[in-house]
């Protein structure tokens, strides 16, 4: 009961913060504190949304721009899941495998994605292939490292207990190592999704003809702050929804997390 009351209070705090930001935005534009060229009114942003929704932007509908971004993100994210999770778990379980992959990951992980994006563009062109490769590299490291960390921190007596009961290495991996590491895996997946999303927007700003990031950049060339604000708000909402999907999957799959 107490926890439910706390949740209700937390929701109202969240609603209050959003309302306060909106009122501050409205007040700034209503009283002319800042030029509407720099900060458009909420009504102007809403009208920009309706216009793009009805007429599209530069030859593409709003849904086509959004779909272009989500397609790039989804393909790269799927590739990360099917490669980084198995390799990360295997590296955590086997020190020799970790010794092979760790230097590569640790070398490129601190690099800003846009620093090596120019190389990918030279190799693969400015199409979707280079963007997907960039997103894959950006998302691979967080998931790989989280998987390795999740396996390494497993208490040795769990594994020894399973061996004592006659479990094979395969059974230990799937019934002990993997379930215990799931919480860390989802932490890495959430981090990777956020990194990929921010990298996607940056990649579209560098070389693209569609997508939400490109829409914002193109609007900035014409000082269309209403479209810029709309694009930024759309990015934020989309990012929150994507993160909520991952969190829902985590609560469903790792249902024992946080329970004694």
Image (cartoon, rainbow, N blue to C red):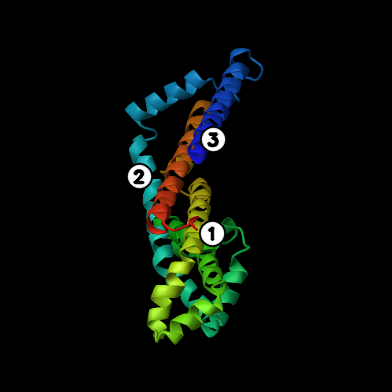
Seen at 54% across and 35% down, the residue is 10
Could you tell me residue 146's position as x and y percent? 53, 65
Q: Which residue is mark 1?
A: 117
Q: Nearer the viewer, mark 1 or mark 3?
A: 3
Q: Image height check: is 71 above or below 123?
A: above
Q: Which residue is mark 3?
A: 10
Seen at 48% across and 56% down, the residue is 259
**Number of other residues with Cα within 10 Å of mark 1, as a class: few under 14, some 14 to 19, many 20 or more:** some
Earlier in the chain: of badge 2 and badge 1, it is: 2
- Badge 2 vs badge 3, beta-carbon distance below 8 Å: no
Residue lying furthest right: 33
Mark 2 → mark 3, Cα distance in angstroms:
33 Å
Tell which of 92 and 41 is nearer to you: 92
Mark 2 → mark 1, Cα distance in angstroms:
22 Å
Q: Secondary structure at mark 2?
A: helix
Tell which of 53 and 166 is nearer to you: 166
Q: Which residue is mark 2?
A: 67
Left or right: residue 59 compared with residue 88: left
Q: Secondary structure at mark 3?
A: helix
Q: Image height check: is 241 above or below 21?
A: below
């Amino acid at each position: 009961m107490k926890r439910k009351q706390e949740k209700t209070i937390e929701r109202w705090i969240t609603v209050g913060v959003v309302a306060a930001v909106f009122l501050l935005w409205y007040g700034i534009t209503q009283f002319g504190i800042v030029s509407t060229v720099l900060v458009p009114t909420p009504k102007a942003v809403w009208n920009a949304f309706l216009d793009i929704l009805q007429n599209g932007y530069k030859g593409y509908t709003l849904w086509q721009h959004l779909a272009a971004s989500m397609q790039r993100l989804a393909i790269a994210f799927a590739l990360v899941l099917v490669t980084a999770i198995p390799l990360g778990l295997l590296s955590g379980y086997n020190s020799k495998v970790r010794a092979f992959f760790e230097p590569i990951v640790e070398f490129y992980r601190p690099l800003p994605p846009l620093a090596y994006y120019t190389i990918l563009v030279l190799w693969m062109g400015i199409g979707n292939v280079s963007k997907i490769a960039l997103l894959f590299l950006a998302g691979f490291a967080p998931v790989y490292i989280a998987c390795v960390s999740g396996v390494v921190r497993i208490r040795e007596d769990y594994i020894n207990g399973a061996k004592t009961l006659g479990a094979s290495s395969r059974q230990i991996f799937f019934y002990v190592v993997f379930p215990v590491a799931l919480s860390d895996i989802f932490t890495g997946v959430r981090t990777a999704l956020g990194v990929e999303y921010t990298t996607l927007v940056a990649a579209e700003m560098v070389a693209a003809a569609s997508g939400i990031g490109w829409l914002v950049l193109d609007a900035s060339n014409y000082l269309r702050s209403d479209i810029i604000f709309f694009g930024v708000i759309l990015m934020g909402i989309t990012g929150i929804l994507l993160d909520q999907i991952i969190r829902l999957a985590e609560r469903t799959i790792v249902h024992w997390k946080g329970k004694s």
